[in-house]
Amino acid sequence: MELNEGTLQVLKNFSGINPNIMIRNGNVLKTISEAKNVLAKAEVQNEFSQDFGIYDLNEFIGVLSLVDKPTLSFQESCVVVGDSSGRSKVKYFFSSEDTLTTPQKDINMPDAEISFTLDSSTLDKVKRAASTLGHNEVVIKPGNGSIVLSVTEMQNSTSNSFDIDIAGEYTEGVDFKMILDINNLKIIPGDYDVKLSSKLISQFSHKELNVQYWIALEKTSTYGV
């Protein structure tokens, strides 16, 4: 099986969420952060023929980079990574599932009270503002017919802040402050449909790729208060 660029992109992204992964038979990849506050799921073009565990995903990605057009040949306890010429190969052994942090079940997203589209340009601005101001949180709140993304420090009323207005849907007259830790926004670049629930969970769905993320909202979030 030749590993394509889309699958490799997903694996690289998932390595930033969790350093290990359990890959299941089929074409669906899942991962969950050690803190259990970020779950990611992707459908890829490659079809894996068996279950196998990778303890150090970054190391495995490094192994794939040792050859051009990596081709995977699965054995019972390992995978052989070869190149297009057949001259180079690496034998990489699997890890037991009980040594890995793996998702146990999918998330059933509750009804979302707030929804909007987050384009890559806006997300980049939010992340750059957080880096510049030294803040870790983005507060999502209602504006005058829009939604405001505010990079600020909620515990400090005099902290410097960055606000950007975006279009979105929510119930008029209901106040809310939904808070995301920017460090949890480890998502593949692109545009996303975003849903937020008062149950303190968010869903990010990539508009072009079949990739989704469920990211926990901070417990200091409020809705209808």
Image (cartoon, rainbow, N blue to C red):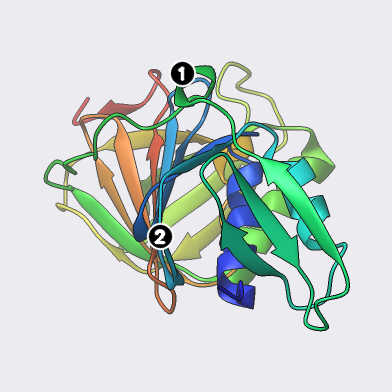
Q: Position of residue 178 (x, y in %)?
A: 37, 36
* In this view, 102 is above or below 170: above
Q: Secondary structure at mark 2?
A: loop
Q: Position of residue 72 (x, y in %)?
A: 62, 64
* In this view, 225 is above or below 42: above
* In this view, 16 is above or below 225: below
Q: Which of 214/196 is in front?
A: 214
CA neighbours of label 2 inside 10 A, class few (<14), some (14 to 19), many (20+): some
Q: Position of residue 17 (x, y in %)?
A: 59, 39
Give the amino acid type for the residue marked by disc 1 in the picture.
Asp
Q: Quadrant of residue 135?
A: top right
Q: Which of 100/147 is in front?
A: 100
Residue at (16% x, 41% y) in the render: 108
Drawn side of residue 7 relative to residue 116, left or right: right
Q: Secondary structure at mark 1?
A: helix
Q: Which of 218/54 is in front?
A: 54
Which residue is denoted by mark 2 in the rendering? 49
Residue at (74% x, 78% y) in the render: 69
Residue at (68% x, 24% y) in the render: 158
Q: Is residue 188 visible?
A: no
Drawn side of residue 150 relative to residue 92, left or right: left
Q: Give the number of the disc on residue 98.
A: 1
* In this view, 186 is above or below 179: below
The residue lying furthest to the bottom in this view is 85
Q: Quadrant of residue 15?
A: top right
Give the amino acid type for the residue marked by disc 2 in the picture.
Ser
Q: Is residue 135 visible?
A: yes
CA neighbours of label 1 inside 10 A, class few (<14), some (14 to 19), many (20+): few
